[in-house]
Amino acid sequence: MTTYITTPIYYVNALPHLGHAYTTIVADTYSRFRRLCGDRVRFQTGTDEHGEKIAQAAEAEGVSPRAYADRISDAFRQTWPLLAVEPDHFIRTTDPGHIRTVQDILAKVHAAGDIYFSEYTGLYCQGCERFLTEKELVDGNCPDHQKPPKEISEQNYFFRMSRYQQWLIDHIKANPDFITPERYRNEVLSFLSEPLEDLCISRPTSRLTWGIPLPFDDKFVTYVWFDALINYLTGIGYPDGPDFQEYWASAEHVIAKDILKPHAIYWPTMLKAMGLQPYRRLHVHGYWNVDETKMSKSIGNVVRPGELVAACGTDTVRYFVLREMSFGLDASFSGTAIVERQNSDLANDLGNLFSRALTMLAKYAGGTVPAPDEAAMTAEDRQLTADLLEMVSIYRREMDQFNFSRALQEIWKVIGQLNRFIVVNAPWELAKDPALAGRLRTVLSLLAEALRLIALVLRPVMPEAAARMARALGLAEEMAAATLERDGVWGLLRPGAALGEIPQLFPRIDKKSQPAAPTTTTVKKEAKPASAPPAPMPAPAEHDGVITFDQFGKVELRVGRVTAAEKVAKSDRLLKLTVEAPEARTIVAGIARYYQPEEVVGRLVLIVANLKPAKLMGVTSQGMVLAAKEKDAAGNERLVLATVAGEIAPGSRVA
Ligand code: MSP
């Protein structure tokens, strides 16, 4: 089987926040889940870079749309590893291959007679980048952006979407899981019960140049949605690439409810006009609010993924969002809720089960897998075993239906049963009586096997913790290649096999140090660059010759985790960073023109740890952050922070 899973491609007019992180964690979890089911998987995310919104945001910053898009696209790309999100492909709508294919598709659909030229007057919402119907307005405003749309009247090209309306209705009715959960399917069908208008797919270059030129009329560029939706095809090599042939039939898109209409109506009809089969499923989730309030730049309550990871760790963030949101409904984030989940579900329930069971295996079974004694097995043991296998099968069904929260609740139900099993069977008591050695081995072997199954099913959700669990069970290699089919059965641990070291899975978080109140998220207009003070970036080395190993050895390079960042007052170049390496220190870095403070929090950076402290704009800098610098043909400087290629403990020495 194959699976092709995608996220929306995100607009580059805002930095990544909790909403983007959620969709992308969902897609990553599903991608890992399907791999665990033995599928070949392609997982794609990326950035949507054309259109009015982006052109205006770039103008407001006084940079070219391309330079602006490069910077924010990079911020998205750099955020995903912090969340253990591992896409196979990151697409940008400014990729030359994407642009070429969009033009080929437009030419084909035009030649087939499905694109025509006409005059149109409509109500345009720039936030949505689409025309709204009167019916969609609430008190004259766009319900998503709380602003009245602008009346626009102009000549444009149109896609004959209406031609495919009946086909789409029939397709949705014949395929109950085409749009899920059901409420969104019903919403689309209700919308389709009224006549569908044709879709305006161009913008005159007199109004907008930041887009893909129409191949048949260069006085127009392509409408951003027509360009963006096609990313799902270009990203897997449409039309000739082998991946396209292999994966398209299994395409599944994850989106939030804000972009239902383009995905449920524009996109399938576009595919039909191109002569392609529609995607397999569209999964629509609700919105994240913060403390019951809409997340917004103006309120200043936008939650940044990097800040969350720095405070709670990658796996906790993934677990929290998947457990807390019922897929399809809105959910509310709060610092207290995430700390509560970490302390109770992760540190207490899972962490304690794990460390207690492994400590007893070390103490009473010599750190190896004990052989169960069939004669000492009770009816309760058999029931618990059956419950564990039942959990694996419910988990499989719920994950497939995107009911992540329910799948996790099933796992936590058996975690609760196992914790009670320990208390009831009290292995420390059994160990006191040699006559009960068989029973002790049976109890411990059941626990070890249960932990193996729990690590297996948790892999898609918490890849790092699951890997630590697997290592502790002596299964690092087996687990990496495991499938639910082969490994989701009872009794695979080999008696006598050695167990590994016992890790601490999840530390408890002190309630006082819960994630700080979110900081504002705007991609702010920065002050004009001035002749700035020297920044603690690496100065160009004076390469008048080679250096000795000893000379190099004097430079103490370490990996550090940025846990806080803020602008240095009165400087447009400096950011004051708190870097843990592993002790927290302050480093002032000349990166403010290239990075917003929120963009760097949570990142692993490379630092010179033994540099003599220096005062910069009144702040003492205890080290230097490394970055690479380049100049483009126009002489514009670009700077990118240096980092390591994988997760590693802050403080690790670089040599
Ligand atoms: N560029 C278009 C999508 C084109 S796809 C062919 C776009 N971009 S966006 O940056 O606005 O991203 C919207 C998506 O971000 C939502 O559909 C959802 O996946 C995610 N979210 C943004 N804010 C969100 C919340 N507050 N809550 C949950 N997800 C949200 O639309």
Image (tube, grey):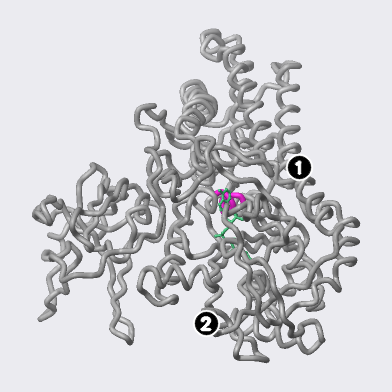
When asked about the image quadrant of residue 551, the answer is: bottom left
Where's the N terminus, which quadrant?
bottom right
Residue at (91, 61) in percent of width and height: 170
The amino acid beneath tag 2 is Thr
Mark 2 or 1, which is nearer the eye? 2
Residue at (13, 77) in percent of width and height: 546
When asked about the image quadrant of residue 453, the answer is: top right
* 604 relative to 424 in the view: left or right: left
What crowding class fits label 2: few (fewer than 14 Cα within 10 Å), some (14-19), or many (20 or more)? some
Q: Which of pointers 2 and 1 lies earlier in the amino acid sequence?
A: 2
Helix, strand or loop at disc 2? Answer: loop
* Residue 491 in view here: yes
Ligand 1: which quarter? bottom right
- Is residue 6 a member of the stretch shown in magenta? no
* 70 relative to 640 in the view: left or right: right
The amino acid beneath tag 1 is Arg
The answer to which of 478 and 22 lies nearer the viewer is: 22
Q: Identify the mark at residue 498; answer none if there is no mark.
A: none
When asked about the image quadrant of residue 379, the answer is: top right
- Location of mark 1 (residue): 397
- Location of mark 2 (residue): 209
Q: Which residues are magenta?
A: 22-26
